[in-house]
């Protein structure tokens, strides 16, 4: 199974009777590509992923534009078709603790989705969950299956969620700041894991982050958002060689580096 | 040079409430294993490490927010290892703290002015605090018109500035900053770091800066202390440690920081470890 | 504790206004009972037993009818509000003060103080409350003050539990550490930092407790363990009304409606106050 193309054109999102959050955002994710979506808090970067997954907050709605994914228009779909289209999408969330139900074991949370999406029986789904936990390099996967979320470390929980996201062989995964809550050494392992799985499963990835360093290491192309508008869009190598937009340049200038003496530009 | 705040062979063990059995004292978890740390007047030191390394515990022990189980803590030449709250009170105005979560560290039912004035009130200062509160807010880059607002009415960056104003209102010698920029995005972070540098210059503050972000340390501090599993594994001047880390853990930590530059080999540079 | 303009803002909240108006009407009835009542609530008119409601406000008309002894139902309802409100305020406030102080102490000081208070609460609340109150009233005798004592002795645990949990939660927040760094004494931290954040919850619990106290008093009156049976109280009227419900349903219905409105008033006011006193919810 290979990744599918995502084409977002002129997407506008607004709070009902309130301010506009996204002003005509367009972006393209090629099959099998990792596309970074960068911006500060409030730039609307998470909103793009939420539109795609159909999980907009209450009183927020799409006011215009189109989202074409795997040859299908997602904007304006009814509930049932939306659910069917959703089978080819998955999310790796930011906070691995609140994304897991604290009162259910890992196994039942992982297999729920697989039984629903892939029509597996409980024992088939359990076997697949076990295989996926192997694939995300969890030690003692049998033990982990029967544990509760609070019994795992932050990095382990994120691995479980990554395994769950890839288990249904989606064509595109939205990763919403998946490493923000983790320590740097764990972050590196998780980034590598996401990249490896993305390659071996040939999944497209929309990677939402505020960290230019993370973009540099994992993305092929990148979109920079500021206040709900696209300010720059380029292949990663191009943008890191020479950022064109003044806002992008300011982001680079404000990002501190341990290997360079401090020159904070406010 | 005499040290302003100092810890010698510091041990800290805290009761583990979740493993407590009825009618027994809770078992102890040893968090710091003999840490030696010192900060000179006017100096800025970064304390870095991953979660569970003991960096926050070290900071809290320096301020005597918790009592060490062994070793010694000194402030301005005075042994405060086991000093009572009453003995500490006169020193509190000289050692202040800025908290990680500015919303949680401000009392939701007190106005900004009242929160900033608390350290003045606490040291028994009954003169009208208003002029000094306004001066501290202004120094922290906030308009005096925010003084009568409440914490939930401010933005994240503004709240962090209120936390800074509260920490400087008594003109302290030493400020402990615990992960104060980790929740902020880079542009707000850059402004707060700039403000701290300016305050250090103007007030001659000593700053202990606890963070997991090594790059931020380079911006703000002269010296860095690397902690791992309750011990200091390496310390030295920032340019030396970051250019030529001596300890393997420091090397591992530095190599895990994603710098904003293209490096196709970076992700595969280290053998994968299973979790 | 109150932010400027809290009161004015609260008056735009329909819950606060509805609850407040209901309780104000009740308060006026209780205070001016003598002036408002058309009859003496104890006067028996054996010529007019179980007279139905009569809205011709002439002489001898009973607007809400009479009971089996010919006593005016409206007057008894008005005088009954005195009993209900006395119990609500005295028992409610005493319960709140006792429970809140113990809960604060347990949550803030922890250690053996917490262990002692928490175990007492555990043991105390394992007795069935109605049984406990009946035993208590039987021991110290019937009467209004016995009812108040019974309510306080039973319900302090409810406050204590909730306030202790809230104090523990507040104590762990950074602003308490910030107060320690500022150099505040423990007593000052308790009163200046924690109490203002716990008090709104106590106030909300208090309004709910007042509603509950009215119900408990009515229950004890119903089983004849409150004030003497000819003195007017709503619970007593419900008990009497039950016996004549087929001939004269107005005795029962009047008392039940008044009881319902009172408890509703306290609960709605409590909900409204909860919204108003939370600086973030506002």
Image: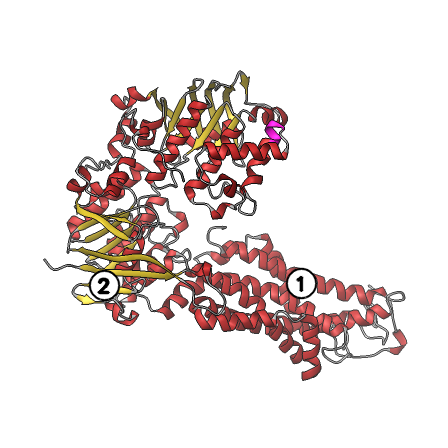
Q: Tag 1, which chain?
A: C
Image quarter where the C terminus of chain B lies is top left
Of all residues shown, which one is farthest toward the left?
A: B1
Residue at coordinates 75% horizontally, 79% vertically from top-left? C231
**What is the magenta range?**
A115-119
The picture places residue A32, in percent across and down from the top left corner, at: 43, 20
User: Which residue carries the number 2 mark?
Assistant: B73
Against C8, is C215 above or below?
Answer: below
Q: How is the protein colored in the picture?
A: secondary structure
Q: Tag 2, which chain?
A: B
Residue at coordinates 26% horizontally, 52% vertically from top-left? B231
The picture places residue A41, in percent across and down from the top left corner, at: 38, 36
Per the model, the C-alpha gap separating discs 1 and 2 is 58 Å
Residue B127 visible in the picture: yes
Q: Nearer the viewer, residue C100 or C265?
A: C100
User: Which residue carries the number 1 mark?
Assistant: C263
């Amino acid at each position: 199974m290979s990744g599918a193309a995502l084409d977002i054109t002129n997407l506008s999102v607004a709070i009902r009777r309130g301010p506009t959050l996204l002003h005509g955002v367009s972006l393209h994710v090629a099959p099998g590509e990792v596309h970074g979506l960068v911006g500060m808090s409030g730039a609307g970067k998470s909103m793009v992923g939420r539109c795609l997954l159909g999980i907009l907050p209450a009183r927020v709605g799409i006011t215009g534009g189109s989202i074409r994914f795997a040859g299908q228009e997602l904007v304006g779909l009814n509930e049932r078709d939306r659910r069917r289209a959703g089978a080819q999408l998955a999310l790796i969330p930011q906070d691995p603790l609140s994304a897991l139900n604290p009162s259910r074991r890992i196994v039942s949370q992982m297999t729920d989705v697989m039984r629903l999406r892939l029509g597996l029986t409980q024992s088939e789904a359990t076997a697949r969950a076990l295989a996926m936990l192997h694939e995300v390099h969890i030690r003692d996967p049998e033990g982990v299956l029967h544990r509760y979320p609070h019994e795992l470390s932050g990095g382990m929980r994120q691995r479980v969620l990554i395994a769950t996201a890839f288990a249904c062989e989606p064509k595109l995964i939205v990763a919403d700041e998946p490493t923000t809550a983790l320590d740097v050494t764990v972050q590196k392992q998780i980034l590598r894991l996401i990249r490896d799985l993305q390659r071996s499963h040939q999944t497209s990835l929309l990677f939402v982050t505020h960290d230019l360093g993370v973009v540099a290491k994992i993305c092929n192309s990148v979109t920079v958002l500021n206040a709900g508008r696209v300010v720059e869009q380029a292949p990663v190598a191009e943008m890191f060689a020479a950022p064109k937009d003044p806002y992008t340049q300011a982001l680079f200038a404000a990002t501190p580096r341990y290997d360079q003496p401090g020159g904070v530009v406010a | 040079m005499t040290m302003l705040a100092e810890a010698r062979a510091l041990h800290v063990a805290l009761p583990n409430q979740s493993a407590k059995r009825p009618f027994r004292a809770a078992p102890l978890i040893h968090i710091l294993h003999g840490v030696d740390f010192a900060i000179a007047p006017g100096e800025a030191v970064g304390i870095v490490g991953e979660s569970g390394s003991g960096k926050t515990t070290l900071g809290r022990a320096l301020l005597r927010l918790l009592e060490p189980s062994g070793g010694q803590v000194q402030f301005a030449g005075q042994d405060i290892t086991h000093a009572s709250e009453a003995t500490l009170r006169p020193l509190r105005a000289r050692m202040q703290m800025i908290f990680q979560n500015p919303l949680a560290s401000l009392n939701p039912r007190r106005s900004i002015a009242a929160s900033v004035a608390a350290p003045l009130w606490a040291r028994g200062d009954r003169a009208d605090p208003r002029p000094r509160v306004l001066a501290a807010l202004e120094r922290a880059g906030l308009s005096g018109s925010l003084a009568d607002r409440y914490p939930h009415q401010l933005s994240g960056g503004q709240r962090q500035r209120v936390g800074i104003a509260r920490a400087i209102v008594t003109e302290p010698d030493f400020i402990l900053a615990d992960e104060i920029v980790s929740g902020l995005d880079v542009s707000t972070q850059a402004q707060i770091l700039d403000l701290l540098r300016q305050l250090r210059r103007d007030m001659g503050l000593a700053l202990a800066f606890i963070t997991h972000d090594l790059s931020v340390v380079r911006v703000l501090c002269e010296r860095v202390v690397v902690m791992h599993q309750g011990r200091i594994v390496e310390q030295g001047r920032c340019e030396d440690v970051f250019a030529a880390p001596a300890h393997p853990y420091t090397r591992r930590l530095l190599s895990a920081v994603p710098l904003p530059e293209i490096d196709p080999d970076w992700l595969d540079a280290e053998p994968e470890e299973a979790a | 504790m109150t932010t400027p303009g809290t009161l004015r803002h609260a008056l735009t909240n329909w819950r606060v206004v509805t609850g407040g108006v209901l309780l104000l009407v009740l308060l006026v009835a209780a205070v001016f009972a003598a002036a408002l009542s058309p009859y003496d609530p104890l006067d028996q008119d054996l010529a007019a037993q179980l007279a139905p409601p009569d809205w011709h406000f002439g002489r001898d008309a009973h607007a809400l009818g009479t009971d089996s002894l010919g006593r005016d139902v409206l007057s008894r309802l008005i005088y009954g509000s005195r009993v209900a409100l006395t119990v609500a305020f005295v028992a409610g406030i005493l319960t709140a003060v006792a429970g809140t102080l113990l809960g604060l102490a347990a949550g803030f000081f922890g250690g053996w103080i917490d262990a002692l208070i928490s175990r007492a609460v555990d043991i105390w609340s394992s007795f069935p409350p109605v049984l406990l109150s009946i035993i208590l009233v039987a021991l110290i005798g019937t009467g209004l003050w016995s009812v108040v004592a019974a309510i306080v002795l039973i319900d302090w645990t409810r406050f204590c539990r909730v306030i202790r949990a809230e104090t523990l939660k507040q104590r762990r927040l950074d602003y308490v550490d910030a107060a320690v760094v500022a150099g505040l004494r423990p007593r000052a931290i308790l009163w200046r930092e924690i109490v203002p954040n716990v008090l709104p919850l106590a106030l909300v619990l208090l309004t709910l407790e007042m509603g509950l106290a009215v119900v408990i008093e009515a229950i004890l009156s119903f089983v004849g363990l409150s004030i003497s049976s000819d003195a007017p109280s709503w619970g007593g009227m419900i008990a009497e009304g039950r016996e004549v419900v087929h001939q004269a349903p107005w005795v029962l219905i009047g008392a039940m409606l008044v009881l319902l409105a009172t408890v509703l008033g306290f609960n709605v006011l409590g909900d409204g106050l909860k919204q108003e006193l939370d600086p973030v919810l506002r």
